[in-house]
Amino acid sequence: MTEPGAVTESLVVPRTGTAVIETRGLTKRYRGGQLAVDGLDLSVPDGSVFGFLGPNGSGKTTTIRMLMGLIAPTSGTARVLGDPMPGAARTVLPQVGTLIEGPALYAFLTGRDNLVRYDSADPAADPRTRHARVAAALDRVGLGAAAGKKAKAYSLGMKQRLGLAAALLQPRRLLVLDEPTNGLDPQGMREIRTLVRELAADGTTVFLSSHLLDEIEQVCTHAAVMARGRLITQGPVADLAAGTRGRLAVTTPDPADAARILKEHGLTGVTVDGDRVTAEPPSREVELADLSGALVHGGVRVRSFGVERASLEDAFVALTGEGFDVAG
Ligand SMILES: Nc1ncnc2c1ncn2[C@@H]1O[C@H](COP(=O)(O)OP(=O)(O)OP(=O)(O)O)[C@@H](O)[C@H]1O
């Protein structure tokens, strides 16, 4: 006989497929006339690590400001955790942890006292649990041992983690992080990325903006790609590049000869980087065998030969016709 409890449990439907952030035609034109965000339809699935990717100036920060109710859209709508923004800001924002434009820290206070002060400014925060919550948040971001140090002695990466700890003082359904690794050294970047993965594994949806393609590929399950205020594409990261063909790559100690032969066979976009020669792949699969044959006949010693999996960068270039300008 089935226990009633077991039956009930099997009926619990996980919250999947719902959008934590949803925008329709979201548009922002600044007073000077600048169209910063243009008709954005964004859908951020529950439980995703969602990368909001675009070169500098593509409208990411403006979008985040609208999502958080900090500025009003010119037109269109935004829903966060199912409720309209900015209308429902008072009920929505307490469920959202944010790290936008770097944490505001008091340099002469310790990391711990910064968090105590931050928590005290939150009217909804229970002072009786304050010290326990502060300690837990510091541990969560790996700052337990440095909690007694003044914030001015923290590295940039530690300051950023302290900002994240502030966002984690309350249980959150959604974390919104604007360029969380900006300005950090590789070690600091790794720490933040690891932390983001851990937070997501705990079930928190993470929405993070970045102008770093490899960061999105490393950390995110889903992404939206912006260029000049418009959404180029969105979806699972694995699918975004799937529609794009990767490049033909040849590794060889004879790169100049290899490049010449590829060009002679009509290949375009041939570039040489050390012992690596890449090109736009030929349009028909059968030509690949002819090409490798031609290289060998031409005396090129081939170490490796093949069409590589397309990266998000390849997809961006294919979709926009522009290079992904990280320097912005
Ligand atoms: N307050 C403002 N008034 C007028 N124009 C603005 C304002 N804020 C941003 N812009 C312009 O809107 C466009 C989008 O800027 P936004 O900051 O949203 O882009 P971004 O993708 O976040 O880039 P970044 O990473 O450099 O902040 C840019 O052309 C920018 O110059």
Image (cartoon, helix red, strand yellow):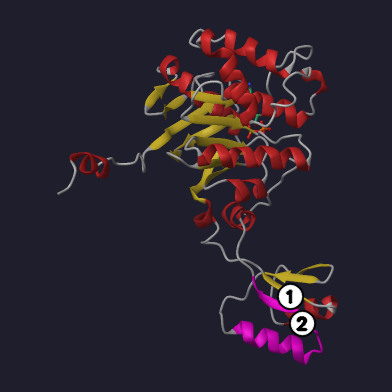
Residue at screen point 68% across, 21% down: 103
Residue type of the residue flagged with mark 2? Val
Q: Is residue 274 above or below residue 202?
A: below
Q: Quadrant of residue 302 in the image?
A: bottom right
Q: Magenta span has 290?
A: yes
Q: Locate residue 48, reporting x and y percent.
A: 48, 42
Q: CA distance from mark 2 to mark 1?
A: 7 Å
Q: Is residue 264 magenta?
A: no
Disc 1 target residue = 250
- The residues colored magenta run 287-307
- At 75% from the left and 25% from the top, the residue drawn is 146
Tag 2 near tag 1, CB within 8 Å: yes
* Residue 218 in the image: above or below residue 247: above
* Quarter of the image where the C terminus is located: top right
| Location of residue 224 in the rendering, given as x and y in whole percent from the top left corner | 53, 44
Q: Which mark is residue 302?
A: 2
Element under disc 1:
strand
